[in-house]
Image (cartoon, helix red, strand yellow):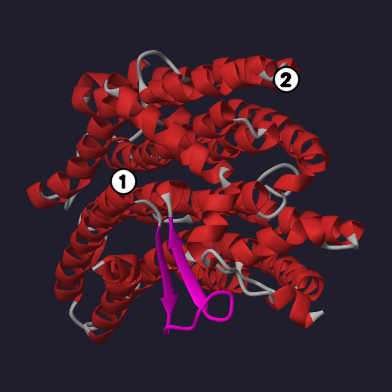
């Protein structure tokens, strides 16, 4: 049963991809299959999380080839949490995508590409092998490029080309580092690599490979200075696509940094900790300044993705249990909040007629429910207590102060204030001020049926509920994050779970 649960989050979207592709000419059938698959994936990930909580790490060797020779899947606390949040985001976006424009999106291939993307994300969170992590990155890149240019507008093609070119550079660097690491350690299994890495004679070459990995994962995470592809492309996507991108794509890169640099390169933390800390500071500052400078809702939210990635890197920079727990808690909170803000932005566009703040206004008077549903994730993103973002930032800043990383903690605090400024800017311009005379009347757009309205607001309400639950019922989430951090720092337990008590001496044999 544990083995079935391990592969289910990958198999379900794989089957959904195939079935929705077969139903290409039947958009309604695609949507039903897609919704059922999203529900099934969420149920499978919840069952897997329960298995991890009750029985510890779940490990599977595909094809019964023993590690490190075969393909290994490993799900611990962090992986299980990321899979559950992937299932939740998949369900929310699958419902939202049944709203306005569903027919056109499904005829263009939204459903197969969407589930292929979920499959790639689930594979990246489950794999215990560096080469297969590269393969899942490629699956995500192909699916995400297709989703990004779904409407085939000139703006989307321009953003899509920038997106795919910069990501191709990142994956090429990733492949180079994989080859270098294999040459140095004789293995690609992460547990085996973690066992062998401290004994490699040429530690300089090992550090060079680690830098290449950091560059590749940094490009995927959109950290400074590798973030340009994100604000150049996300604002061009349709809102369901932008929401799933904002929720998951950059977080896969963050997950890879946390996984690799707490497992394989933990012995080199004195070298990489300060580097990652400096990257985190620059990413927070550049992202929030970009958000403060723009007056388009999508661009503001896109730059906020960048700034918030900096908070998530603090755990790896400090490498203390509290700091890593703060990163885990912040990642969970941010995925929910950021996806929800893009969903709300889509509803604002539907009701206000534009994403440009100068053309919006008066939405509080005509759509007070939308205003409330915006305030919950917006204030949470800014870190206003007692919402979920407050607890994530509190743990990160406290970890920084305890580690005497005062600059890191101070920047994190200041960036929170600037985030609040940009959220207030959206509120004042879109909701509070009077609608400009040239703007379309603030009313539901033509063709927005009751069913489409329900599909639009149901996932927004669901994600607001999750945000409030994390904020007002924080203790179990904080305890889980601390348990995930302790599991990440217990390298010996991970290695023993994957390789067994007597690991094979593949690296020595290969050399």
Q: Nearer the viewer, residue 219 or 135?
A: 135
Mark 2, residue position: 405
Q: Is residue 329 left or right of residue 163?
A: left
Q: Residue 412 location, x and y as percent?
A: 62, 21
Residue 109 x %, y %: 34, 75
Residue 198 in which image quadrant: bottom right
Location of residue 365 with respect to 452 vertically, above or below: above
Whole-number angstrom distance, CA of label 1 to CA of label 2: 33 Å
Tell me, yes or no, if residue 153 can be seen here. Answer: no
Q: Which residue position is annotated with label 1?
A: 53
Q: Is residue 202 above or below residue 404?
A: below
| Residue count near mark 1 (Cα–Cα under 10 Å), binned few <14, some 14–19, many ≥20 | some
Locate residue 454, reporting x and y percent: 13, 45
- 480 left or right, relative to 173: left
Residue 38 is covered by the magenta coloring: no
Q: Residues within 10 Å of mark 2 (few under 14, many from 20)?
A: some
Residue in the picture at 45% in, 26% down:
381
Taking the spot 35% from the left edge, 70% from the top edge, the residue there is 10
* Furthest residue toward front: 502
Q: What kind of element bears circle 1?
A: helix
- Residue 159 visible in the current orientation: yes
Whole-percent x, y for residue 218 in the image: 68, 51
Residue range of the region highlighted in magenta in the rendering: 58-75
Q: Select label 1 or label 2 by which is in front.
A: 1
Mark toward the start of the polypeptide (1 vs 2): 1
Q: Is residue 497 left or right of residue 407?
A: left
């Amino acid at each position: 049963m544990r083995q079935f649960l391990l592969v289910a989050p990958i198999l379900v979207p794989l089957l959904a991809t195939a079935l929705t592709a077969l139903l290409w000419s039947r958009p309604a059938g695609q949507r039903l299959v897609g919704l059922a698959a999203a529900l099934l994936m969420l149920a499978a990930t919840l069952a897997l999380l329960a298995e991890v909580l009750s029985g510890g790490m779940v490990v599977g060797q595909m094809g019964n080839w023993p590690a490190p020779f075969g393909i290994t899947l490993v799900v611990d606390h962090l992986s299980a949490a990321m899979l559950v949040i992937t299932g939740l985001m998949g369900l929310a976006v699958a419902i939202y995508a049944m709203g306005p424009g569903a027919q056109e999106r499904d005829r263009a291939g939204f459903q197969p590409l969407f589930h292929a993307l979920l499959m790639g994300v689930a594979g990246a969170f489950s794999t215990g092998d560096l080469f297969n992590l590269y393969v899942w990155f490629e699956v995500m890149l192909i699916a995400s490029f297709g989703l990004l240019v779904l409407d085939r507008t000139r703006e989307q093609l321009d953003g899509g080309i920038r997106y795919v070119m910069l990501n191709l550079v990142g994956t090429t660097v990733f492949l180079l580092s994989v080859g270098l690491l294999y040459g140095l350690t004789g293995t690609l299994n992460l547990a085996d690599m973690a066992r062998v890495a401290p004994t490699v004679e040429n530690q300089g070459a090992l550090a060079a490979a680690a830098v290449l990995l950091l560059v590749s994962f940094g490009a995927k995470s959109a950290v400074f200075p590798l973030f340009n592809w994100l604000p150049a492309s996300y604002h061009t996507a349709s809102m369901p696509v932008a929401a799933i991108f904002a929720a998951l794509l950059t977080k896969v890169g963050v997950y890879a940094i946390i996984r690799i640099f707490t497992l394989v390169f933990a012995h080199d933390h004195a070298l990489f900790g300060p580097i990652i800390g400096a990257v985190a500071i620059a990413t927070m500052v550049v992202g929030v300044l970009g958000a403060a400078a723009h007056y388009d809702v999508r661009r503001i939210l896109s730059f906020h993705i960048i700034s918030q990635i900096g908070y998530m890197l603090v755990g790896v920079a400090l490498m203390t249990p509290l700091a890593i727990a703060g990163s885990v808690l912040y990642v969970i909170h941010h995925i929910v909040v950021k996806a929800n803000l893009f969903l709300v932005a889509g509803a604002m566009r539907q009701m206000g007629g534009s994403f440009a703040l100068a053309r919006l206004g008066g939405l509080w008077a005509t759509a007070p429910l939308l205003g409330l549903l915006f305030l919950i994730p917006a204030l949470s993103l800014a870190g206003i207590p007692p919402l979920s973002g407050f607890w994530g930032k509190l743990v990160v800043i406290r970890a920084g102060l305890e580690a005497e990383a005062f600059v890191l903690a101070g920047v994190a605090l200041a960036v929170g204030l600037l985030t609040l400024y940009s959220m207030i800017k959206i509120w004042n311009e879109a909701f509070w001020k009077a609608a400009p005379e040239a703007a379309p009347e603030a009313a539901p757009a033509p063709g927005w049926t009751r069913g489409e309205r329900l599909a639009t607001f149901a996932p927004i309400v669901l994600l607001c509920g999750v945000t409030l639950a994390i904020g007002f019922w924080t203790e179990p989430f904080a305890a889980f994050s601390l348990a995930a951090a302790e599991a990440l720092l217990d390298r010996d337990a991970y290695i023993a779970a994957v390789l067994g008590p007597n690991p094979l001496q593949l690296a020595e044999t290969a050399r």
